[in-house]
Amino acid sequence: MQISDIETQLEELRLGATAAIATAESPEKLEELRINYLGKKGQVSKILGGMGKLSPEERPKVGAIANKVKQTLQTNLDEKRTSLQVAEIAALLQAETLDVTMPGVYRPQGKIHPLNSLIDKALDIFVGLGYTVATGPEMETDYYNFEALNTPPDHPARDMQDTFYLPDGNLMRTHTSSVQIRYMEKHQPPIRVIAPGRVYRRDTVDATHAAVFHQIELLAVDERLRFSDLKGTIKEFLRQMFGDLPIRFRASYFPFTEPSAEVDLQWNGRWLEVLGCGMVDPNVFKAMGYDPEKYTGFAAGFGVERFAMVLHQIDDIRRVYASDLRFLQQF
């Protein structure tokens, strides 16, 4: 083999490799070309394999030409690799670029359910009056739901509340008054507490009754609290909730308050019963270890669904549980 033959092969390889490198479209393809031309078993090494047939004087000259070809190809590879990386970064930036002048994608916002909205409003009012929000378990014992509230097993008042009893002897609470008992067990007067929550009764479901509904009850215990304090608190709450409307108190009965009253509100020309209230019975204080000669207190409670039906003129209580968007979107 003549030196001119090797020089010709190296030049043809340089031209072919330069063209292939220039058209490579990915770093992976570029790595394949590097191995193909410059690897240990690449084309440059194969061509240089014929140097053994050259004279000692010719070999250095061929080696210099081969090194120049290698350097040229390596330079081309490096430049092409940098070019591909720059293009890749530019494409990524272009894909991730945000046009802040474009209008946003509209997604309808959710709205607060009318029951949750009413609960939030009621709690805001009472917190503003100095009350603390308290919660308790929905599954209760007979003691917290009835006995501690001056309602022993043979008390006729138990017939006023059809109760869901559980196989283990517990029950689903029929009112959130049980929260007041649990709170009084752990705290000493003065007490100002408001207890919202879900309650359960075995009512026949119709337009005005539900087996599961929401109730909010309040309790205040201190020295020298009077019925006039209860009336003032109820009037202020109803004023903030419904506006400055006529209200009236009617004598009633609850086993855990004495005296007891029901409160009516004149709404759209007719009287509506909105809540029950009364002074805490001394027997309740005795069960909690409070001195009934020193402390007095008052309590009140109302159904959230009843308030919602009045405020929003809802004709059927079942609508608030139906998840009908046509109904819910009105609020």
Image: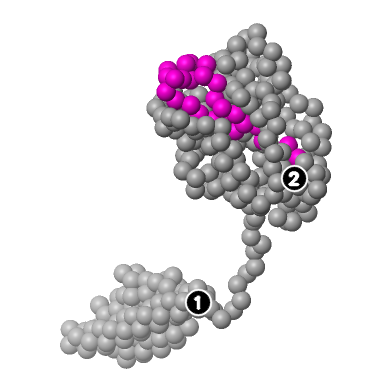
- Going by the image, does 175 lie left or right of 182? right
Q: Residue furthest top?
A: 154
Of badges 2 and 1, nearer the viewer stands 2
Type of amino acid under label 1: Thr
Residue 268 placed where, x, y %?
79, 49
Q: Quadrant of the N terminus?
A: bottom left
Q: Nearer the viewer, residue 323 or 296?
A: 296
- In the image, which residues are magenta? 272-300
Residue 121 placed where, x, y %?
59, 49
Q: Is residue 139 visible?
A: no
Residue 73 placed where, x, y %?
34, 83
Query: Which numbered disc covers residue 266?
Result: 2
Tell me the crowding category of disc 1: few under 14, some 14 to 19, or many 20 or more residues within 10 angstroms, Cα based: few
Residue behind mark 1: 97
Query: Which residue is depicted at the point 60% across and 72% down?
Result: 104
The answer for how far apart the CA atoms under marks 2 and 1 are is: 61 Å
Q: Nearer the viewer, residue 285 or 99?
A: 285
Type of amino acid under label 2: Gln
Say whether residue 299 is magenta.
Answer: yes
Query: Which residue is depicted at the point 43% across and 76% down?
Result: 89
Q: Nearer the viewer, residue 9 or 114?
A: 114
Q: In the figure, residue 213 lies in which quadrant? A: top right
For residue 16, above or below residue 42: below
Q: Nearer the viewer, residue 228 or 101?
A: 228
Residue 328 placed where, x, y %?
73, 52
**Which element type, helix, strand or loop, lies under badge 2?**
strand
Mark closest to the chain's N terminus, 2 or 1: 1
Say whether residue 79 is magenta.
Answer: no
Query: Which residue is depicted at the point 66% across and 40% down?
Result: 304
